[in-house]
Structure formats: C-alpha cells, structure tokens
Image (spheres, grey):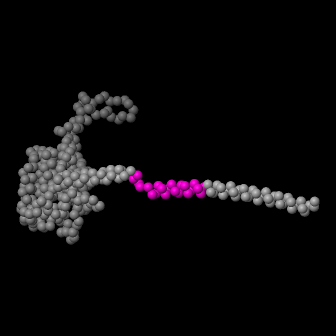
Amino acid sequence: MSKQRIYLLVGAVVSGVLVLATAGITATGISKATALRVDMLNSFSKLQVFFKKNPYPNAENVTVENQNFDLLKERHATLLKELSKSAVTVERTHTPGSFSKTCEETVNALRKAAPQGEGDASVIVPDFNFGFERYDISKGVKPADQKNVPQLLRQLRMVDMLVRVFYNAGIIKLDKVLREEFDSASEDTGQERGRGRGGRGRSAAASSTEVTLDKIEVEPFSNVPFALDRQRFGFVFLTKEESLFSLIDKIDAMWPFAQISNIEFIKSGKDVVFPPTAGELPAATEVTGISAPPAGITSRIVSGVLREAPVKVAMTIDIYTFGADTDQELE
C-alpha cells in the first residue's frame, strides 16, 4: 500500500473520531439544555401560580383587617371628641364693646385674686394688665376689631386660667405676661399675618443676672390631618425651687392640654453661706499639692428654704385645642 493511501486512511479515521466526538458533545449539550429548559418552564409556571394567587389566601384575614380598621377609626374619633371637650370657646353674641367689658372684669378679678409674695407685697404691681394693655379702657384706647374678638376672648380666658395656676403655685413676683399679639400684626407691618405666627422676638438670657422675654414667636402648623389650634403665652416671674417644680406639675396637669415650650432661668442672687468659725477649721495638712485646708462643714450648707436665693424665670406655655374650628366663634 502506498504512503498516500495510508495517509488518507489515517485522516479518514481521525475525522470519523472527531465527528463522533462532536456528535456526542452536541447530544449531551442538547440533553442538558432540554433539561434546563424543562426546569425553567416549571419554575416559570410556579411563579405564575404565585402571581395569580390572592395576597390573602384566607378570606377571614381580610374580614379581621377590615374590622380592626373600623375599630381604629372609631377610637380615633372618640379620642378627638374627648380632646375637643377641653376647647376654650366663646359665644356668638360678643361685640368689641362686650369684649372690652369682659376684659376689664377679668383683669380686675385677677388683680384682686393676686396673693401676697415675700414681705407682704402683692405678686403683681397694682396696674398689671396681664398682656392686654392694648385694651385698657381706662386709657381711652380703641375697641378691638370685630374679626379679632373671638380669638381675643379665647386668649383672655386662657390667660385667666394660667395666671391662677401661677398664683396657686406660690410664686414670689409676676413681672410680665405676654400673648401672641396677632391683632397688632397688620398695624405693625402693614400686612396680615397668618393665624398661629407671632413676632420675631425670642426669649434669651440678656446678661448673667437677667432673663428677658419680649415677644412671642409661633410657627404655624402644616400637614395636620385634623383641626388643631395652638395659643402661646409668655411669663417672666420670680420664684423659688419648690414653687417652680409645683408650677411645672400644675401646668402638666392642666386641662385643656398645656405644654411648656421653653423655659430659661437664672439665680437672682447667691445662696446664703454660713462662714465657719475659727474652732471649726481643720488643722493644716502637710499633703503635697493642697495649698489650703478644706472649708468647715457649715460653710457648705447652702440649701433650704430660708437660705435659697430665688430664680428669675422666663417661660412660654402652649395651650392646644383639638378638633374645633377656632377661626369661628363657637357656642
């Protein structure tokens, strides 16, 4: 046999082997692809079944959720109803003249009810107006605008409630009462301001020995899902620690709902310190680093009612009204 035929025979055998190997690999790949395709179709079918299912397979769950939602709405309505019972409202019959009279009567009643502070002195000055100086009839001022009467009356009643709480707490001196003067906004700036926004002033410690509160600043509410009104009032007063804690507790227990929105205070003087006598001074120590012996025990007695210096306090208080249209006079 010639070499040429041998080469052709070997080439044919090798080609046959390659063809058979390729056919085997192809058959195996097709088999695997077919199996994977079957798995994919099965998974896709299962996914479609899940997509078509009701998200609440048990219809009873839907009923329970609806019942819970109805119960939640009922409780929410009950809560708003109870909260709205505390709303400070006014009658529809008030006029600027009747407001002036009511304001005078309320202010005079608060003056008469003022208790004695330290030294048998009243906690207020004789002509104190409790934030309603603008409507002091004795000064011949103009009556209030009719549109402002409803809110002014509500503020007057709220001030009356708050001041009596201060009286009952046993403060020493009531120096200032401020309210949100919405009625002066158009006169001061030449334009109307929205309900719930006050002046630009703020409370601050003016110095190391004084606190001040000049104007009330209130930002309006936004995105509130129900009727809600907030009236802010400011107070500057002198008191002692026990009375201050009592006042905070009384405000927290008030109804309508009241909240202290800011408080700043500073000592009006130094607490009384009893200097030690010569016999109470300990012997000099020889311990390195101590330049002087410690003070006697009596020199550190700085607490107690008789030795406590009062504090000057600037406080703002918010009163909230829930679920009532306070832009209108209510019966």
Q: From this viewpoint, which residue is outermost toward the bottom? A: 190
Q: What's the residue at 23%, 61% (across, down)? A: 196
Q: What's the residue at 21%, 50% (across, down)? A: 313
| Closest to the observer, 28 or 264 | 28
Q: What's the residue at 75%, 56% (across, down)? A: 21
Say if the magenta span includes residue 301: no
Q: Quadrant of residue 193?
A: bottom left
| Closest to the observer, 170 or 302 | 170
Q: What's the residue at 22%, 63% (across, down)? A: 195
Magenta part of the protein: which range?
36-57
Q: Main secondary structure of the magenta part?
A: helix
Q: Is residue 132 visible?
A: no
Percent x, y of residue 90: 12, 59
Percent x, y of residue 105: 6, 57
Q: From this viewpoint, which residue is outermost toward the right? A: 1
Quadrant for the N terminus, please.
bottom right
| Closest to the observer, 105 or 55 | 55
| Closest to the observer, 82 or 149 | 82
Say if the magenta span includes residue 47: yes
Quadrant for the C terminus, please.
bottom left
Q: Is residue 41 visible?
A: yes
Percent x, y of residue 251: 19, 48
Judge left or right: residue 193 versus residue 293. Answer: left
**Whether residue 140 is situated above or below residue 124 in the rendered picture:** below
Judge left or right: residue 147 versus residue 220. Answer: left
Percent x, y of residue 320: 21, 55
**Whether residue 162 is situated above or below residue 279 in the rendered picture:** below
